[in-house]
Amino acid sequence: MASTLHYGFTNLITIRVRHSTKPKTRTGPQWRRLGPRPVRCSVAVGENRRVTVKNGNDSLDICRVLNGMWQTSGGWGRIDRDDAVEAMLRYADSGLSTFDMADHLAEDKWRVVVKNGTDSLDICRVVNGMWQTSGGWGRIEQDSAVNAMLQYADSGLTTFDMADIYGPAEDLYGIFINRVRRERPPEFLETVRGLTKWVPPPVKMTSSYVRQNIDISRKRMDVPSLDMLQFHWWDYSNRGYLDALKHLTDLKEEGKIKTVALTNFDTERLQIILENDIPVVSNQVQHSLVDMRPQQKMAELYGTVMGGLLSEKFLDTNLTIPFAGPPLNTPSLQKYKRMVDAWGGWSLFQTLLQTLKKVALKHGVSIPAVAVKYVLDQPAVAGSMVGVRLGLSEHIKESSAVFSLVLDEDDVSSIQEVQKKGKDLLRIIGDCGDEYRRA
């Protein structure tokens, strides 16, 4: 109710217009010119519950408390059509008979469109990363994993990222999307996105080879067209990546892929690809509070909470003492710990966690929420990846909190003060993705 009352009709109560030979200047929100002559909008209050808004001969009586329907647009949980209509009838029967809606959401903080020319795809800005299904994070039970995917999607977190090499990830998505088709309304299905990666060996990229591999992903994910195919290439000295991307573009033209994208490409190769008229819509790269390399040259989306290192779990811990802190027992924790070591070491990382904790307490959120929001606020960042351990643990509430969090200047300044003390990973490691290609 509070959000509805904030959108009261105060600007409709009195709208005055006056003639003037001077240029028309609005001196406040109430001054408007509606036509060639002065017009006054007025309000007539009949009973306590209802009010008439009018302008000349045009008028409408409405309930003074409006039922705002923004909450049906996603982000507040899944809407069942029959239950929703029954609820509307109950509101109307109680006398709350005016409903406010729109043909579209003016500003959807949850979603963003990635595009290049005429190619585009709208995705949720917090992406559910499924690397964690590939082994190393615990055994994945199929039914529990798919149920967890439905819970994420029902909460508004409807975009999933996977790869052909992420174990059963594509197969799980295929089972999940079929349940969505059967158990959710068609308009809900339209919000779900499956982003997959193709990580081929650096062999000759023929049209038939590319087509065969894309068809495998389409079959596993049980979709006629992949929402996004993100392409990875191991060896830049082999220019076959251009052949592969041209064949992928052909498959896009055939309707087997909706958008072509990249993962872990550096700036130099990205420029070459764009110069060859390959319409990639995004480049998924590593980006976090520790690793800000994308902001020096480019940025899109990747692991923002560093596999879980940027969390309360590792605050005030000392990993230099054996068994003194939480174990680094997953591939992502081990990967991002190496980034911490290169950036400035565990002591500086603790300073960063302590700073993030102060910001988190100030806003009533968690450290991961602050870390994700900070990266989402960076220029050119479309989305942020948060890994999901399907059926083992969930962070739906934390991920959803990102969209209502607003970091102020003091928050940003305090984080940047710690970042300045870290080393330049662009100089130490190289450009985005180079960490995967170092000997």
Image (tube, rainbow, N blue to C red):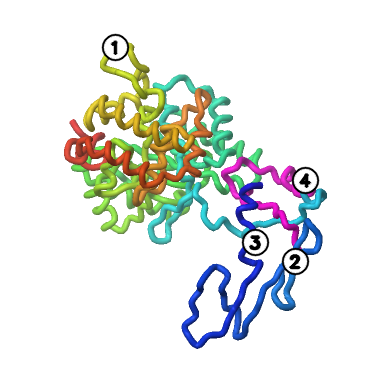
Give the residue at x 60% y 85%: 36
Q: Residues within 10 Å of mark 3 (few under 14, many from 20)?
A: few
Direction from residue 298 to residue 374 in the image, left or right: right
Query: Which quadrant of the figure has residue 105?
Result: bottom right
Task: Name which residue type carries label 3.
Answer: Phe
Q: Which mark is residue 52?
A: 2
| Among the two numbered marks 3 and 4 on one chain, the one whose residue lies closer to the N terminus | 3
Residue 194 appears anywhere in the view = no
Q: Residues within 10 Å of mark 4 (few under 14, many from 20)?
A: few
| Among the two numbered marks 2 and 1 on one chain, the one whose residue lies closer to the N terminus | 2
Q: Which mark is residue 9?
A: 3
- Between marks 1 and 4, how big is the CA–CA gap? 59 Å
Q: Residue 100 colored magenta?
A: no
- Between marks 4 and 2, how big is the CA–CA gap? 27 Å
- Between marks 3 and 4, how big is the CA–CA gap? 27 Å
**Circle 4 sits on which residue?**
86
Q: Residue 64 colored magenta?
A: yes
Q: Nearer the viewer, mark 3 or mark 4?
A: 3
Q: Are marks 4 and 2 in contact (CB under 8 Å)?
A: no
